[in-house]
Amino acid sequence: MRNLLLVLGVYGLFTLSLTAQHPDWEANYPDGCTSITAGRGATADGSVITSHTDDSHRTRSWMDITPAARHPRNATATMYRRVTEDSLKMPAYRHIPIGEIPQAKETYQFLNTAYPCMNQYQLGVGESTFGGRDELQSDAGLIDCQRLCQLMVERCKTAREAIELAGELTARYGWNDYGECLTIADKKEVWHLEIAGPGKGKVGSVWAAQRVPDNHISVNANASRIREIHLDDPDHYMASKNVFSLAAEAGWWQEGEPFEFCYAYAPESRTSMAARRREWRVFDLLAPSLELDPNAENYPFSVQPDEKVTLEDLITVFSDYYEGTPFDMTKNLTVTNEEGMTVISPLANPHMPYDMNKLFHINGGWDWMGERTIARWYTMYATIIQCRDWLPDEIGGVVWLALDNVASSIYIPIYCSVTDLPVAYKTPGRPGGYTRESAWWAFNRLGTLTAQRWGDMRHDVNG
């Protein structure tokens, strides 16, 4: 037992060096982000909400402000391809120019995170990769996920405008990324847009979008979730013109049979316990009366929460690691306390690097990697985005930003109209390695220290 406690006590010291050794996709499944959405009738204050955790070992760790601008006739916007960059102090990405598209006459101010997240008109965007069939990926297009998020917040004021723009631009200039879900909110409603490539060597895209009912919440956790699409109900569904024909031509769907977008274009994502377990947990925490099966293959696209959802509720959900459930990875890391009772060790930590799971024989829905919890030790940043139509845009739109592991971080409010940020939040934390000038490193260090005695120190952090 002493050896067990010794290893548990020191493993956190190595967390920073270990986290950089793993690729973004473990076991070849996308595992990088969770996005929770809520309609205005599902929230306590009437906000429309989207959100995003950027769970990555490479993406940028800072935020800056891109101001509104007017552009001359014939101006262009450069498109980039994101590639891995391993020549810096820590793993990162670099962005290679691959082409240009016509620039808009006017572009709006936006808060610029790795995935641009909100503009001056309260249009907010969250993101979660679902991958999709390998056959859909194409290098012929110009637009990837980060660029599409930017184009949306630069050029659009509503979620429907953003979806229509995405369809138009990717049809003309091509989607060159993996399958992505973008959760797009405005002052009235929130939609999930699922988009993938058109196939090797082709320019275009295939996509579907579904609206979250006003009194519902929804989630995307790295799996396609849109099933049947009813295009005769444009108030709740939208899709690309080729949404049926592409699947039929590829042999993934036969006309006359029920069509489900997720099974046509990303069937493997419905087999991922890393995704499904998070879907279940979000609904389990916010709508426990449904008593959903944690091992189900599918869940409703959206559900009505048992109580109106607050910002604090969502922070709790994003900090969750299945505590108190059969999927809590600390449940077998026990000690005997002074009263002679067997209890979870205060040194047990749900955010251990995968190497430690093997050491302590921790398995789960993610096999030797344990469980893919909502809170992750490799989160780069997280946002909860509120759109509030009863307030002026300048203060109605607010991004709550947390850096590093949400379970040991804090969310700060950033209004969509701000023109500057504290230097620490604008300072890159990773390309040059450790620096006291970066807020990301401050929270990363806090998380690493908290890991030393998680059972006790998490309460100090939360207090």
Image: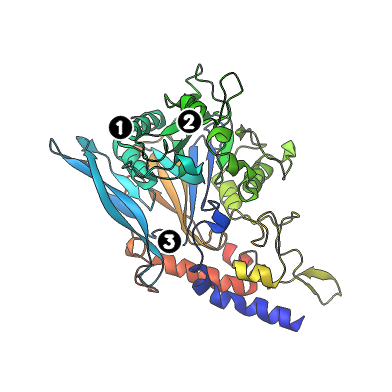
Instruction: Please determine whether, in this image, residue 281 is positioned above or below residue 319.
Output: above
Callout 2 crowding tier (Cα within 10 Å): few <14, some 14–19, many ≥20: many
> For the view shown, which residue lies furthest in the top direction?
232
Dot label at residue 58: 3
Residue 382 screen position, x and y as percent: 48, 53
**Does 211 sit left or right of 145 as displayed?**
right
Instruction: Please determine whether, in this image, residue 265 is positioned above or below residue 428.
Output: above
**Does 386 sit left or right of 120 as displayed?**
right
Amino acid, disc 1 = Arg
What kind of element bears circle 3? loop
Q: Is residue 441 visible?
A: yes
Q: Tell which of 284 and 389 is nearer to you.
A: 284
Q: CA distance from mark 2 to mark 1?
A: 19 Å
Q: Is residue 390 visible?
A: no
Disc 2 or disc 1, which is closer to the eye? 1
> For the view shown, which residue lies furthest in the left direction?
73
Q: CA distance from mark 3 to mark 2?
A: 28 Å
Q: Tell which of 27 and 94 is nearer to you.
A: 27
Q: Are marks 1 and 3 in contact (CB under 8 Å)?
A: no
Residue 210 screen position, x and y as percent: 51, 29
Q: Which residue does the image show at 28% across and 43% down from the upper left?
A: 109
Q: Are marks 3 and 2 in contact (CB under 8 Å)?
A: no
Amino acid, disc 2 = Ala
Dot label at residue 209: 2
